[in-house]
Amino acid sequence: MSSETRGIRNRNVGNIRYNVSNDWLGKIKPPLKQDNEFEEFKSYEYGIRAIIKLLQTYHEKYNINDIKGIVKRYAPVVENDTDKYIQQVENITGIRAGKNIDFTPDSLKSVIKAIAKIESNYVITDSMYSKAVSLL
């Protein structure tokens, strides 16, 4: 068994759940797909891109405007200690949980880096993030 986290093995450092109807760019599909619960991507950059797109969808579709709203949807209480997760994102980003944020890729960078750290203990570099943004 590999000592890597599932998110690292899947190049899905945000641990986005698998959904057959999500046709993410760079998504690994059956029969090559091996993880039945979480998405798998061809590279980390495609996985990071998916997190950006997912958070932007939260904003556009559900009118989510802050870290608290993001985390409540992204890491629901049925699976996570959501309050602890919110506090971790606040601590990592330095952004108050209830403060409205801009949902541009540049503004989401610190939030997405925090998610990767919490979900997969993974550090997204600035160059990886820039490459992910270029895939949008």
Image (cartoon, rainbow, N blue to C red):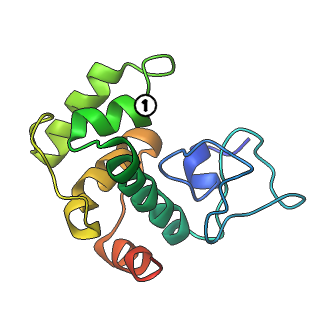
Q: Depth check: give the residue in front, 94 or 100.
A: 100
Residue 92 shows in the view: yes
Left/right of residue 124 with respect to residue 96 in the rendered view:
right
Q: Position of residue 76 (x, y in %)?
A: 44, 25
Q: Depth check: give the residue in front, 127 or 17.
A: 17
Which residue occupies 43% across, 31% down? 75
Q: Depth check: give the residue in front, 75 or 5.
A: 75
Image quadrant containing the C terminus: bottom left
The residue most toward the right is: 31
Left/right of residue 14 with respect to residue 34 in the rendered view:
left
Q: Which residue is mark 1?
A: 75
Q: Position of residue 33 (x, y in %)?
A: 80, 56
**Element type at mark 1:** loop
- Label 1 crowd (10 A; few <14 / some 14-19 / many >=20): many
Q: At label 1, which amino acid type do we have?
A: Ala
Give the vertical position of 120 relative to 26 (above or below).
above
Image quadrant containing the N terminus: top right
Q: Quadrant of residue 119?
A: top left
